[in-house]
Amino acid sequence: MTDLAVQHAFANDFGLVTAEQTAERLVMRTQGGDACAYVAMKGTENRFLGLAFEVEDATALEQALKLDGARDLGLLDLPGGGRAVALSDPDGNEVLLVHGSHRLPVGEAYTELQLNTPFRKERLGRQQYERDIGPARLWRLGHAGLFVKNFAASAAWYGENLGLIGSDVYHVPGVPQVQIVGFMRLNRGDEFTDHHTLALMQDERGGCHHISFEAQDFEAQQCTHKFLRQKDHEPIWGVGRHPHGSHVFDVWRSPDRARFETFSDTDLLRASDGTRVHDISTVMMDNWSNDGPERYFA
Ligand SMILES: [Fe+2]
């Protein structure tokens, strides 16, 4: 990354917390207990390096070392530490598998929203509004979206090596056998997981399209949206709601020309909940507006 200071200022406004800042490296975390959620290295260009997944136990790292091209990185020189094995995906992105990182105390949440509807009154004798207009309180890195050169090859690689399964997958208009976009989730058996942990979008540009952090709820996202506008950051899309995955989203341009997103209220699926396949020309991406995704993909 060419300018760590500018990226740092944006990340702070967005809601990430500084874990480490040197001339060579910026490490940010959320308030959800991770010691490290985002790393930027000083460099001569703005380029995506890779992403990391936490694995269940040390045995998973040993198994990963048997995969093609796996490299044992040993103990990580990052806040939280842990041991890592590095893989390379079909586009050459580094994919770290990490185990044994230390976690931090969790930050303070907002008082949960209580909603009064025509049918059920929950909030009695209390006035609700108490949220601050400011950086988001972010709880975890929930998913990443990658531009990939070949969707079929990348989806197969993440499926075979990490066990990811499609939640909603999209094919070119009228040609079901040519899939180009997919929201992929973890396979945790009967355990419910986010609708997607990785989104793969076929696009020659490659690299990272966006990273997405979980906010407490839509109210928190709206407050942070207002704050980021006051700070003259560049909005891309939202606050809106995706029909697939159901989550409320808000996407902003980061100074390195990538995108940072907050999300809340995502669908949760089990492995047995299957994969839906769609013709991409039939899909609206925002339930709450008629905005197309032009700026999102620009
Ligand atoms: Fe997203």
Image: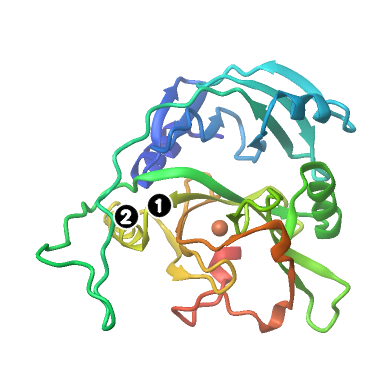
Tell whether label 1 touches label 2 (CB within 8 Å): yes
* Residue 298 visible from this viewpoint: no
Mark nearest the camera among 2 and 1 is 1
Residue at figure coordinates x 48%, y 43% from the top left: 140
User: Which numbered disc, 2 or 1, marks the residue that appears first in the sequence?
Assistant: 1
**Which quadrant is the N terminus positioned in?**
top right
The residue that appears at 61% across and 31% down in the rendered structure is 44
Residue at image position (80%, 45%) is 91
Please determine whether, in this image, residue 17 is positioned above or below residue 279.
above
Q: Could you tell me how far apart the alpha carbons at marks 2 and 1 are, in whole angstroms?
A: 10 Å
Residue 141 point in image, percent of width and height: 52, 44
The disc at residue 224 is 2
Q: Which residue lies furthest to the left in this view?
A: 125
Q: Position of residue 58 (x, y in %)?
A: 71, 23
265 relative position to 100: left or right? left
Reading the image, the residue beneath label 1 is 215
Judging from the image, what secondary structure is the residue with disc 2 in? helix
